[in-house]
Image (cartoon, coloured by chain):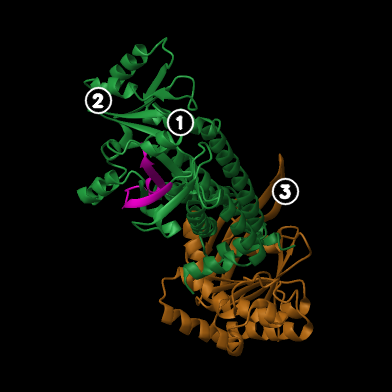
């Protein structure tokens, strides 16, 4: 018998209790890991490093209001601007309304330059881009989206419009790979398709995505554009891409505070449950602890064995909780990644795994230490008398 | 019976108590349990500590075994002045010199007989092979070689106590202390356990100090020491 075997056997003396506490730990660690990862994912949406020099120019009154496409010329004239891409959320679906994914009518001539990081520009050839530019009814799709629907270059994708009364039939001209999975769940088609199919959209667009030469150009640009269109029929609201995304996240309420509140509640609850379980388990072994000490085990050695038991118990629960959270993250990516692209990036990151495991270990140590310390400081004779 | 006071035969003392006292405190009230105990127990003695409830016999046993400390006097056991040892040193001393036999056996329920006997050896630094040999030897001595894979719940009371005795002797201690070792056993098993302890004393020269209420059990010892209200009353040599 080795020390670890002794600890393991002690831990398994009440299998039902051990399984129940491990089960509650799995649930708790799973909950904390998933919630913290959700927060990380949402933070990533609003802290996209690729968008450090990108801006969105839209109507001041809201996303449903349009801007004249003629604004594009003014935007291009600004010295800070590298490129401008007109972009309109189309909101169509493929075959079934549940088969929803992000799709946009966009200015095909500047799309690749404006979003060059997202399109993984290195992997796209000039010929492929030309194919897309040549075909007015062409479209481009991300690899994840293509895989999910079994599409390949040359396939025709009929989209059913939900916001606009057209059902464009688009031919896939390019399938792109992107560094981030969320950027692969998108379809773009020529802006002309929308303008020609929907008369009221003639000369209008939902937003302009502007790429500046340098991030430090942004404040000056924002101030100038919004001042230029102030008091016009189409006033603008210019903001960084991250600020634009943050507005969507804010629609969910103060999600950060909610998540941190739930996490704190779960941590306190599991600390109480684990502490109570360990206290009961140690109290039941009062005599056994006294016998160990009578045989020559020092108080500190017994304390060490009990602490290791607590940490092992919580460690097993924590590892399984993280494992289940990882499986759940895969399911979330598969089920929600299309409808809400940022969920395509949903993952239990190593930092979250480490934080969850360290937190679980700390709870194990804290919950075990107090009853274990008290038990090992109790006089041996008192412990032996507890036999009754 | 020979009734000479505290004459436990000659020989080198393994236990020497000088004016040992022990009191407990209940809030501000001091409750003396042992007072002025002077005693020398020679190597190879087999002592039965007897006396009415509350006379201090278990307290005396605990002091000799190093699981309690006196409030006065000095206590030398197996060549060590126990008052001079700190808690960790005392724990190591117990592991090396003392084997415990309890009334309720106190085996660890999640360990089988082999593992229970092996427990004190985990502290000795003995390798796996050496531990196995010593456990098998101890279990053979108590005639339980065929039960080494059994858990306490799969053993009779007598067998459990024999496993506990094997655990007490596996480190080859100089001193065995037993607190009512037959208190939970029927007559037949009690007789077997007492015969085993007698053998450990006569054949293996283990010094044994046993607390018992049972005159039959006490009759197996070489000497009986009687306590009365915390003081030594008399020592009696048992004529067998």
* Image location (x, y in percent) of residue A334: 49, 54
Check residue A275 for magenta coloring.
no
Q: Are marks 1 and 3 in contact (CB under 8 Å)?
A: no
Q: Chain of mark 1?
A: A
Q: Nearer the viewer, residue B233 or A361?
A: A361
Give left or right: position of A122 versus B207. left
* Image location (x, y in percent) of residue A34: 51, 47
* Image location (x, y in percent) of residue A62: 49, 24
Which residue is label 3 attached to?
Answer: B31
At numbered mark 1, what does the secondary structure look like: helix, strand or loop? Answer: helix
Over which residues does the magenta segment extend?
Answer: A169-191
Give left or right: position of A273 versus A260. right
Closer mark to the observer between disc 2 and disc 1: 1
- Residue A89: image quadrant is top left
Question: Drawn colour of chain B?
Answer: orange
Q: Nearer the viewer, residue A72 or A333?
A: A72
Q: Are marks 1 and 3 on the same chain?
A: no
Residue sitting at x 58%, y 84%: B148
Number of numbered discs overlaid on the protein picture: 3
Which residue is label 2 attached to?
Answer: A81
Vertical relation: A134 (above or below) B183: above
Q: Which chain is green?
A: A
Q: Chain of mark 2?
A: A
Residue sitting at x 48%, y 67%: A4
At numbered mark 2, what does the secondary structure look like: helix, strand or loop? Answer: strand
Vertical relation: B75 (above or below) B96: above
Which residue is label 1 attached to?
Answer: A199
Q: Nearer the viewer, residue A79 or A276?
A: A79
Q: Are marks 3 and 2 on the same chain?
A: no
At numbered mark 3, what does the secondary structure look like: helix, strand or loop? Answer: strand
The CA span between labels 1 and 3 is 103 Å
């Amino acid at each position: 018998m080795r020390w670890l075997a002794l600890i393991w056997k002690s831990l398994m003396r009440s299998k039902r209790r051990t399984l129940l506490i491990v089960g509650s730990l799995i649930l708790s660690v799973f909950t904390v890991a998933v919630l913290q990862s959700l927060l990380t994912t949402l933070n990533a949406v609003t802290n996209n490093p690729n968008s450090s020099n990108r801006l969105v120019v839209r109507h001041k009154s809201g996303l449903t209001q349009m801007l004249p496409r003629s604004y594009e010329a003014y935007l291009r004239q600004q010295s800070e601007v590298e490129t401008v891409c007109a972009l309109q959320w189309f909101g169509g679906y493929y075959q079934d309304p549940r088969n929803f994914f992000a799709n946009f009518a966009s200015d095909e001539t500047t799309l690749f330059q404006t979003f060059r990081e997202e399109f993984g520009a290195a992997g796209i050839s000039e010929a492929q881009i030309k194919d897309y530019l040549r075909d007015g009814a062409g479209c481009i799709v991300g690899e994840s989206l293509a895989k999910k629907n079994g599409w390949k270059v040359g396939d025709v994708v009929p989209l059913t419009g939900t916001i606009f009364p057209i059902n464009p039939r688009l031919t896939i001209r390019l399938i792109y790979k992107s560094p981030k999975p969320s950027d692969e769940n998108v379809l773009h088609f020529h802006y002309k398709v929308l303008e020609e199919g929907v008369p009221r959209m003639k000369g209008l667009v939902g937003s302009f995505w502007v790429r500046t030469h340098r991030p430090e150009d942004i404040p000056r640009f924002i101030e100038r554009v919004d001042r230029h269109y102030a008091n016009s029929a189409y006033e603008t609201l210019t903001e960084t891409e991250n600020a634009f995304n943050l507005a969507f996240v804010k629609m969910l309420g103060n999600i950060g505070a909610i998540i941190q509140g739930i996490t704190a509640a779960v941590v306190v609850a599991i600390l109480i449950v684990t502490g109570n379980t360990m206290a009961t388990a140690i109290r039941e072994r009062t005599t056994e602890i006294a016998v160990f000490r009578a045989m020559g085990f020092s108080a500190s050695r017994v304390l060490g064995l009990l602490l290791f038991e607590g940490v092992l118990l919580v460690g097993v629960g924590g590892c399984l909780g993280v494992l289940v959270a990882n499986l759940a993250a895969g399911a979330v990516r598969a089920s929600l990644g299309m409808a809400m692209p940022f969920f395509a990036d949903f993952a239990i990151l190593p930092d979250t795994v480490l934080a969850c495991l360290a937190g679980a270990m700390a709870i194990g140590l804290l919950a075990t230490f107090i009853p274990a310390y008290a038990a090992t400081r109790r006089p041996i004779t008192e412990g032996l008398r507890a036999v009754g | 019976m020979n009734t000479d006071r505290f004459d436990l035969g000659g020989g080198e003392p393994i236990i020497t108590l000088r004016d040992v006292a022990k009191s407990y405190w209940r809030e501000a009230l001091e409750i003396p349990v042992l007072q002025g105990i002077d005693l020398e127990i020679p190597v190879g003695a087999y002592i039965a500590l007897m006396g009415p409830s509350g006379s201090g016999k278990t307290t005396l046993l605990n002091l000799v075994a190093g699981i309690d400390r006196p409030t006065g006097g000095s206590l030398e056991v197996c060549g060590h002045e126990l008052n001079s040892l700190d808690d960790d040193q005392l724990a190591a001393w117990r592991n090396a010199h003392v084997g415990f036999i309890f009334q309720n056996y106190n085996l660890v329920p999640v360990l089988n007989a082999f593992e229970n006997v092996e427990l004190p050896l985990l502290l000795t630094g003995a390798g796996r092979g050496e531990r196995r040999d010593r456990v098998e030897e101890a279990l053979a001595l108590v005639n339980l070689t065929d039960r080494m894979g059994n858990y306490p719940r799969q053993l009779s009371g007598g067998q459990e106590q024999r496993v506990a005795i094997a655990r007490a002797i596996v480190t080859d201690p100089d001193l065995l202390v037993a607190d009512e070792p037959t208190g939970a056993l029927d007559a037949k098993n009690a007789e077997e356990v007492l015969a085993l302890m007698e053998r450990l004393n006569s054949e293996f020269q283990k010094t044994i100090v046993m607390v018992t209420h049972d005159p039959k059990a006490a009759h197996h010892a070489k000497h009986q020491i009687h306590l009365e209200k915390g003081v030594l009353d008399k020592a009696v040599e048992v004529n067998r």
